[in-house]
Each structure stands twice: as C-alpha cells, then as structure tokens.
Amino acid sequence: MPEPYAAALPRSAAPKPYAPDELRALDRAHVWHPYGPMPGRQEPLIVESASGVRLRLAEPVEGQRELVDGMSSWWSAVHGYNHPVLNEAARGQLDRMSHVMFGGLTHEPAVRLATRLVEITPGPLQHVFLADSGSVSVEVAVKMCLQYWRSAGRPAKRRLLTWRGGYHGDTWQPMSVCDPEGGMHELWSGSLPRQVFVDAPPDGFDAEPDPAYARRLREGIAEHADELAAVIVEPVVQGAGGMRFHSPAYLRVLREACDEHDVLLVLDEIATGFGRTGKLFAAGHAGISPDVMCVGKALTGGYLTMAATLCTTRVAEGISSGEVPVLAHGPTFMGNPLAASVASASVDLLLGQDWEGEVARIGAGLRSGLAPAADLAAVVDVRVLGAIGVVQLDHEVDMAAATRAAVREGVWLRPFRDLVYTMPPYVTEDEDVARICRAVCAAAREG
Ligand SMILES: *Cc1c(COP(=O)(O)O)cnc(C)c1O
C-alpha cells in the first residue's frame, strides 16, 4: 500500500508532560473517576507506567515509588503489565489496522477470537457477540433473552430473576439486577425495570448445600415462570456485590429449574472467567452450561476494553427466525481488531501455561498470608477461592487509611464497603503474594 501520510508526519515532539501538581489539579477539575463526585475529593495516585506486577508512580507516596498491584486492575490484568507477547500482538495489529466498522465487514482478529471463545467455553455456546464493555455485554445478554421469547410468541416473558448480592454492571438493565439494597444502585430503584429477587445464596464454596434454600430457588422460578425471560447470576463468586462465595450446587439447581420451567439461564462470568476461581470458567465447578454467558475483564489481559456475550444455537435461531429476525444491537467499535488481537493473544498465553498451577499457587500463598488477619479484632471473615483473597471487617473500611497502610507496604489495594480484598495477576511471585498479604492485613488493621 502507498503511505498516504508520509509527507504529513509531524515534526513536533510529544506534548510537554504535566508536573504532578498540575495533573492533579486538572484531574480534580475535569475528570470523573469511578463512583466519584465532581470535583474529585480523593487524591488519586498518579501512575506513570506499569510493568510485570508493579505500578510505577510519578512521585513517591509513603516512601514508595513502585506498588505491587493486588487488584489486577479490577480482575483484568491477569498476565501483569507491559507483557511482551501482548505488546507484540497490539503492535502487530496496530500496523495493520486499529479499527474498521463491523457492519458489512469482517476481519481475522474478530473471527479468530470468537472461534477461540466458542472452543474454550461450554459446548452448547456457539455464537458470539463482541461488545465493548462488560455492562454492554450484559445488556446484550438481556436483549437476547427478551427477544428470544418475543420471537417464540411469548412476549410476557420479559422479567429477570436473580439472587441478591449480585453485581452486573452500571448501565440500565445490569443495574436492575444488581443487589437492590446497600448497593450502588439503590438510588434508582424506582426507575429501573422491576426484577424478581430471591435471597442471596448461603455463604461458603465448600458449604453443604442448603435444601431449604434450593427449594426457595426452585419455587421462585416456578412461581414467576410465565413472566421470566431469564435467570441471571454470577456463578460461584459474587464480586462487586460483596465478594461472597457460594456452593456450585445452587447453579445446578438453577439449571434444572430453568429447564423445567422454560426460563433461560445467563451466567455473568465477567469477573470469574479465565481461571480466576480455579476453573477456566466458574460454570465448570458445577459442570453446567448456560444458555447465554458474558465474559469481559480478563478477556484482553487488561489491555483494552472488550467483552463478549455467547449464546446457544437455540437462542440464536430463536431470535433470527422471529418477527424482527435480527439482534438489533451494533456498537460502533464492535469487534475492534486491536482489542480482539490482544484478547486472542491473552487467551493463548493463558492456555499455553500451567494457569491452574499458578492460580493454585497464588491461592495457597493467600491462604497462609491472610491467615493472621483472622486474629484481628475487627475481622469477621477471611476467605480464599482460586486466586481471590478476601478479608471482611465488622465496619465500613476507612478507605484513605486502608489505602495508606497498603501503600506503606508497597502494595496497591482498593477496598470497598467492609472488604479488603485482592486478586493478584497470575504472574505474581511468591514474595510479592506475601507482600500483598501483609498489605491486606495492614489495611484491615488500620482501615
Ligand atoms: C465488572 C463487572 C461487570 C461490568 O463490566 P464493565 O466492563 O465494568 O462494564 C459486569 N458483571 C460483573 C460480574 C462484573 O464483575
């Protein structure tokens, strides 16, 4: 191809960097942060670069210039930062094209990724919608389910059932199935679609399943079957709704009851996918397959925003043979080649290593390193599953004090509500896992 911009390459250098104080002032004045006010009230730390499991700060904070990342940037950076393989995938794709529209066009990065996702997820999931964020993938999942029943001539089936304590994202439909109490979305309870809630599943991954609770799940689904399009839950781990673990047995109950009463089952694996809980997907703990499944977060190894909604042939054909025989959803950046290339590289990187061994190793490190937290007066529970460690307090964490305590140990943590928790990148070495645990204990003590 000719080089259309050869003559136009700018001679000027990159813009002059902001001094930290200047950057902070502009950030405060103009930039929203997650769940933040305007102008900002908390002082965010300034990250200059990141490599391996370490974030490099623009200036020392509490005597630390580098922090071990205990959060994987909210479940996503499973391979750590600045990974040569993922960099190469991005760079190679950048030289071919960053993006082209997906209407009427297709390309290898999207097709390769979708095919790979079909291969590694439960067998019946055969069709892939590439969305641009986790919340959007949940919107798409809900739209698929509602449209499936509309196409089947049963438009009254348009509500969702979920259990309390969940989190499915911040856009409208996802908000409607987030925990209705104490959650971030209480404010909107009058405006959101009214969904059917059952109690949160009893705590404990290894706990003996409670037959009375299983019965209530079945009854909830049976009672509302005529108006239910789908049941949507996070399998095994409820993440941002409270970092709670439950027995996989309840997922089998949901699968059976959904089949019995003609209700679709949506599993939101956005947080749990790609090995975090010890199985590649958390549905694997229960040996079940959903009708629709959402993945996101670790999909691109934390590089770019992309998520996916997968569905069965039954759902896809139902939609495509209906009165409006298309799924009417099509984001501008659907199938983004840059994100898709990095995602395929990230999946290959994961599956090309002993990820199960690494997740188990980190889990063992968390178990021993967090055990001392159980002796702290304010700690009510310490729990570990896969490469997730959680310390629960008897009070709301003082975020500023807890963050400071962790930073002093050289670790980045982001506690919320009564929880100090960590899900380190899978490449975190044992000494750094130990350091993260010391930081979680310090944050629990001082927060
Ligand atoms: C993070 C998350 C979402 C939302 O994903 P975004 O990319 O933040 O929109 C949805 N469901 C679960 C379970 C999540 O953890």
Image (cartoon, rainbow, N blue to C red):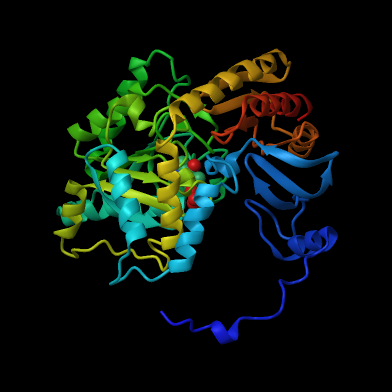
Q: Nearer the viewer, residue 309 or 10?
A: 10
Q: Residue at x 81, y 62 (%)?
A: 25
In this image, 150 relative to 397: left or right? Answer: left
Residue at the farthest bottom position: 7
Q: Please identify the quarter of the rendering in which residue 32 is found.
A: bottom right
**Residue at 26% of width from left, 31% of height from top?**
255
User: Which quadrant would the C terminus be assigned to in this image?
Assistant: top right
Residue 191 visible? The answer is no
Front position in the image: 162 or 52: 52
The quarter of the picture where the N terminus appears is bottom left
| Position of residue 24 measured from the top left corner of the image (x, y, whole percent) | 79, 59
Residue 234 locus on image (x, y percent) = 41, 36
Q: How many marks?
A: 0
- Using the rendered view, name the quadrant where residue 248 is placed: top left
Q: Residue 390, how many percent across, how many down?
A: 59, 26
Vertical placement of residue 114 versus 228, above or below: below
Who is closer to the viewer here, 319 or 353? 353
- Asked whether residue 267 is in view, the answer is yes
Q: Residue at x 44, y 41 (%)?
A: 349
Q: Relative to 433, is 295 above or below?
A: below
- The spot of residue 239 in percent (x, y) is 51, 35
Q: Is residue 440 left or right of residue 16?
A: left
User: 98 above or below 129?
Assistant: below
Residue at 36% of width from left, 58% of height from top? 109
